[in-house]
Structure formats: structure tokens, C-alpha cells
Image: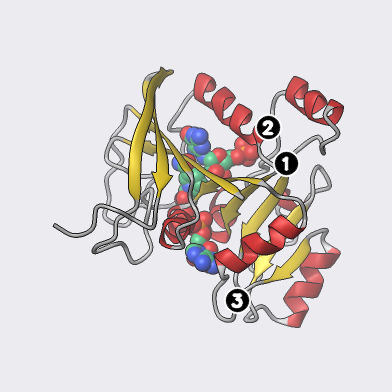
């Protein structure tokens, strides 16, 4: 499976404010670029932290792209995936509407009651992992369901876990012209953080969109640069 991570951050590396409210960091040109990346994907994945903070829809904005996918024999919108160990996704979340298939990756810690409620709300619930979602196992389950190209949109905890699991192939970061600050504000990669074996990034492109810049990287190997 090919995994593409895309996120928008401030120049100081924050994805949102310390209040974790959704924030417009990029602009219309970049949202159109994001829509293109979504259109190329079989599925778009976020963590439950993003669902609780943003209530995203994760479908395509541009009708032409949806029509083109249908012409190519694909579903109109990519599937949506939530990494959600305990099944905390609200049953009225926008991501559970019938616009596209939604997979909820839960762990064994999700109660039978939550799994049933989320299934009744329209999700396909997949168990991967004991306490926390095991991303590698979850991606194997998605591959079995035809997902070859996965876009990861965040947030910081899930992006870190993807790097830690060594599953990222491409990274695209929009750097918006703003400073957010705050030691508790989410960053591009939160989690425990690396002390060595840092992911191996090769800069492949830098392009201006709106009043910011998109940095594109190829991600390779099992982590390369290591500690000094
Ligand atoms: N600027 C941008 O491009 C984006 C910004 N955001 C922002 O990021 C914030 C949400 O990010 P986070 O709080 O970091 O939440 P997140 O969206 O990364 O979800 C993390 C949660 O997922 C669950 N989880 C289960 N298994 C996991 C695993 N193996 N690894 C990691 N998490 C696992 C845990 O409950 C964990 O707390 C919000 O403020 C949102 O607005 C989110 C997406 C994109
Ligand atoms: N690319 C980008 N730029 C920003 O400025 C952002 N705030 C985000 N956030 C991401 O977009 C999701 C919203 O998706 P829908 O419009 O609801 O489909 C949000 O949850 C973040 O993943 N991205």
C-alpha cells in the first residue's frame, strides 16, 4: 500500500491552536490541491482526535473529480477511515453519513456496545490491536478491502504513529504564513517522539500556494539519520 501524509501547519509547526479547534491555515488554492490528493486516494484516514475536534466530512469538494472516479469504475468518493481504539466516534459524526464507505479501526478495548452502535450508525468496524489500534494490522485489513493508496490527513498523534510504524511513503506539508504557538498545541508529529532513527526524508518539491508553501518529501527506508 502507498501511504501519503498531508497536513497544514503554521511556520512554528502547529496543526491547530492549543484549544484544538479547527483552524484555516491554508487557502483556496491549497484546498483544491488537497482535493486532488484525496481524489487520487482509495481512502482518507484521520485519528479520532481529529473527528472529535473538527467533525470532518473528508469527501471530494470538486464534482468533476467525483464524476471522473465513477467513470474509472471507482466509488465517487474515497473511503473514510478513523483510527479510534475505544470507538469514541460520535454516532452523529459527519464522517458516518452515507456519502462514502467509512471504516472504523478499533482495538479490542472497544466495547461490544460501542461497536454495535457504530455499525448501526453506518460504519464498518474493524478490530486491529489490543489496547490501541495496531496501524500495520489495520492497513492490512484495509488492503484486503481494496485500499492500495491511502491518504493520511492527521492529526499529530496519528501522523507520528504512521512514521513510527514505518508506513509513510510521501509527506506533503503546507506551511502557512502564521505563528500559532503554545506548548500544548498539536504539531505535525506528536506521540512520544523520536530520539534516534528519525524518518528518512528527501525533499522532492517546494511550491507556493496561496500565501504559503507546500513542501513535498519522499520518505524512505526504516529511518535513516539517527542520533548525532
Ligand atoms: N492542520 C491540519 O492539517 C490538521 C489539523 N488537525 C488538528 O489536529 C488535532 C487533532 O490531532 P490529535 O489530537 O493529535 O488527534 P489524532 O487525530 O491524531 O487522533 C489521535 C487519537 O487516535 C487514537 N489512536 C488509536 N490508535 C492510535 C495509534 N496507533 N496512534 C495514534 N493514535 C491512535 C487515540 O485515541 C489518539 O488520542 C485537532 O486540533 C485538529 O484540528 C487534524 C488534521 C489535519
Ligand atoms: N489542508 C488543510 N488546510 C487547513 O488549513 C486545514 N485546517 C486542514 N484541516 C484538515 O481538513 C479536514 C476538513 O475536512 P472536510 O473539509 O471536513 O472534508 C480537517 O479535519 C483536517 O483534516 N487541512
Residue 129 — which label? Answer: 3
Q: Which residue is mark 1?
A: 78
Residue 39 — which label? Answer: 2
Is 8 or 143 nearer to us in this picture? 143
Which secondary structure, mark 3?
Answer: loop
Q: Residue furthest left?
A: 228
Q: CA distance from mark 1 to mark 3?
A: 24 Å
The reply, left or right, for residue 188 in relation to residue 78 is: left
How packed mark 2 is, by other alpha carbons closer than 10 Å (few <14, some 14-19, many 20 or more), is many
At 38% from the left and 63% from the top, the residue drawn is 191
Which secondary structure, mark 2?
Answer: helix
For residue 195, above or below residue 57:
below
Which secondary structure, mark 1?
Answer: loop
Q: Is mark 2 within 8 Å of ligand 2?
A: no
- The x and y percentages for residue 190 are 37, 58
Q: Are marks 1 and 3 in contact (CB under 8 Å)?
A: no
Q: CA distance from mark 2 to mark 3?
A: 29 Å
Query: Closer to the N terminus: mark 2 or mark 3?
Result: 2
Picture quadrant of residue 69: top right
Q: CA distance from mark 2 to mark 1?
A: 7 Å
Q: Are marks 2 and 3 in contact (CB under 8 Å)?
A: no
Q: Are marks 2 and 1 in contact (CB under 8 Å)?
A: yes
User: Which colour assignment does the render follow?
Assistant: secondary structure
The reply, left or right, for residue 68 in relation to residue 196 is: right
Image quadrant for the C terminus? bottom left
Q: Is mark 3 within 8 Å of ligand 1?
A: yes
* Ligand 2 position by quadrant: top right
Amino acid at each position: 500500500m502507498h501511504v501519503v501524509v498531508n497536513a497544514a501547519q503554521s511556520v512554528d509547526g502547529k496543526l491547530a491552536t492549543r484549544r484544538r479547534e479547527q483552524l484555516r491555515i491554508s487557502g483556496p488554492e491549497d484546498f483544491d490541491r488537497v482535493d486532488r490528493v484525496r481524489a487520487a486516494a482509495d481512502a482518507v484516514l484521520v485519528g479520532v482526535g481529529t473527528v472529535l475536534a473538527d467533525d470532518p466530512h473528508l469527501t471530494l469538494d470538486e464534482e468533476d473529480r467525483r464524476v471522473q472516479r465513477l467513470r474509472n469504475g471507482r466509488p465517487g468518493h474515497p473511503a473514510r477511515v478513523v483510527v479510534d481504539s475505544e470507538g469514541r466516534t460520535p454516532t452523529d459524526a459527519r464522517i458516518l453519513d452515507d456519502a462514502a464507505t467509512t471504516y472504523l479501526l478499533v482495538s479490542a478495548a472497544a466495547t461490544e456496545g460501542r461497536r454495535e452502535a457504530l455499525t448501526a450508525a453506518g460504519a464498518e468496524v474493524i478490530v486491529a490491536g489490543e489496547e490501541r489500534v495496531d496501524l500495520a494490522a489495520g492497513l492490512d485489513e484495509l488492503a484486503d478491502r481494496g485500499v492500495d493508496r491511502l491518504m493520511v490527513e492527521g492529526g499529530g498523534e496519528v501522523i507520528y504513529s504512521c512514521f513510527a510504524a514505518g508506513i509513510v511513503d510521501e509527506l506533503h506539508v503546507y506551511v502557512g504564513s502564521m505563528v500559532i504557538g503554545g506548548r500544548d498545541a498539536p504539531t505535525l508529529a506528536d506521540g512520544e517522539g523520536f530520539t534516534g532513527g528519525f524518518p528518512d526524508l528527501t525533499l522532492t518539491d517546494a511550491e507556493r500556494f496561496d500565501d504559503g508553501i507546500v513542501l513535498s518529501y519522499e520518505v524512505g527506508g526504516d529511518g535513516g539519520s539517527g542520533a548525532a
